[in-house]
Image (spheres, grey):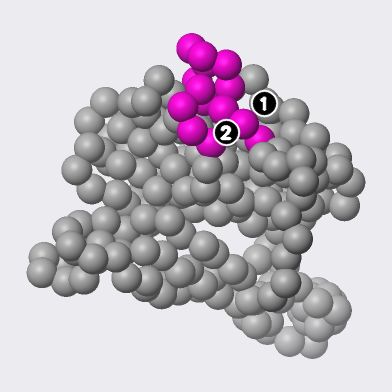
């Protein structure tokens, strides 16, 4: 509840004039991998389009920007062809997962992408993964700015919804797919799964 601002703020600034993030840098998500801090942020390009960018830092303060945006706009006519912004990122030890806001010039929706290194991202073919609410509901104009946590079984998302007049905060869930090796069906891989596999191998169980 008590925070002390760093006297050298800001620690990340817009790029030089004419670069892809010369307008604004905002809406960050940060992870620590045990050696360095990784940040993904929204960067403004010439005041027209927003893209998702990534610097990395070994000490929280000195940020070294990746030379290019790491998540770009969708193809012309796509649901995210105008802006991609507001990333939230999780790392499960194997892959990075990103949920982000996509904008087509009229509406914001929420998409999903994965990456092996946090830099090269592949958008999910079924995007957007969280669409607008039904006409006349509180989030029928925008769904934007996701924050996602994983509790071991399900993903929980808090997001902003807009009806054309007001923003409110919504909640959504998604069940994790069964991990490889989870033969018990409890969505975890443990010694119990190994014992079941051994029992099956020697013919003790079906």
Q: Where is residue 71 in the image (x, y as percent from the top left)?
A: 51, 34
The residue under the point 58% across, 22% down is: 15
The residue under the point 72% across, 72% down is: 2
The residue wearing badge 1 is 66
Q: Where is residue 174 in the image (x, y as percent from the top left)?
A: 47, 70
**Inter-mark Cα distance, 2 to 1:** 7 Å
Q: Residue placed farthest to the bottom in the image? A: 204
Q: Which of the 4 image quarters holds residue 162?
A: bottom left
Q: Is the magenta stretch mostly helix, strand or loop?
A: loop
The residue wearing badge 2 is 53
Compared to 180, does 95 lie above or below? above
Q: What element carries label 1?
A: loop
Compared to 30, does 84 lie above or below? above
Q: Residue placed farthest to the top in the image? A: 18
The residue under the point 45% across, 69% down is: 158
Q: Which of the 4 image quarters holds residue 11?
A: top right
Q: Residues within 10 Å of mark 2 (few under 14, many from 20)?
A: many
Q: Residues in magenta?
A: 12-25
Q: Quadrant of the N terminus?
A: bottom right
């Amino acid at each position: 509840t008590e925070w002390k601002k760093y006297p050298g703020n800001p620690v990340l600034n817009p790029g030089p004039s004419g670069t892809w993030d010369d307008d604004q840098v905002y809406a960050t998500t940060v992870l620590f991998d045990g050696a360095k801090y990784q940040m993904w942020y929204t960067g403004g390009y010439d005041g027209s389009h927003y893209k998702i960018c990534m610097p990395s830092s070994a000490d929280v303060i000195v940020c070294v920007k990746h030379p290019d945006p790491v998540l770009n706009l969708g193809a012309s006519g796509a649901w995210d062809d105008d802006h991609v912004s507001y990333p939230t990122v999780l790392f499960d030890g194997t892959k990075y997962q990103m949920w982000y806001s996509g904008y087509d010039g009229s509406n914001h929706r929420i998409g999903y992408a994965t990456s092996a290194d946090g830099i090269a991202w592949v958008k999910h073919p079924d995007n957007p993964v969280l669409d607008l609410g039904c006409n006349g509901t509180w989030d029928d104009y925008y769904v934007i700015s996701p924050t996602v946590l994983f509790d071991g079984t399900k993903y929980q998302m808090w997001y902003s919804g807009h009806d054309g007049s007001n923003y409110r905060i919504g909640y959504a869930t998604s069940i994790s797919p069964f991990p490889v090796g989870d033969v018990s069906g409890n969505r975890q891989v443990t010694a119990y799964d190994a014992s079941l596999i051994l029992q099956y191998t020697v013919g003790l169980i079906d």
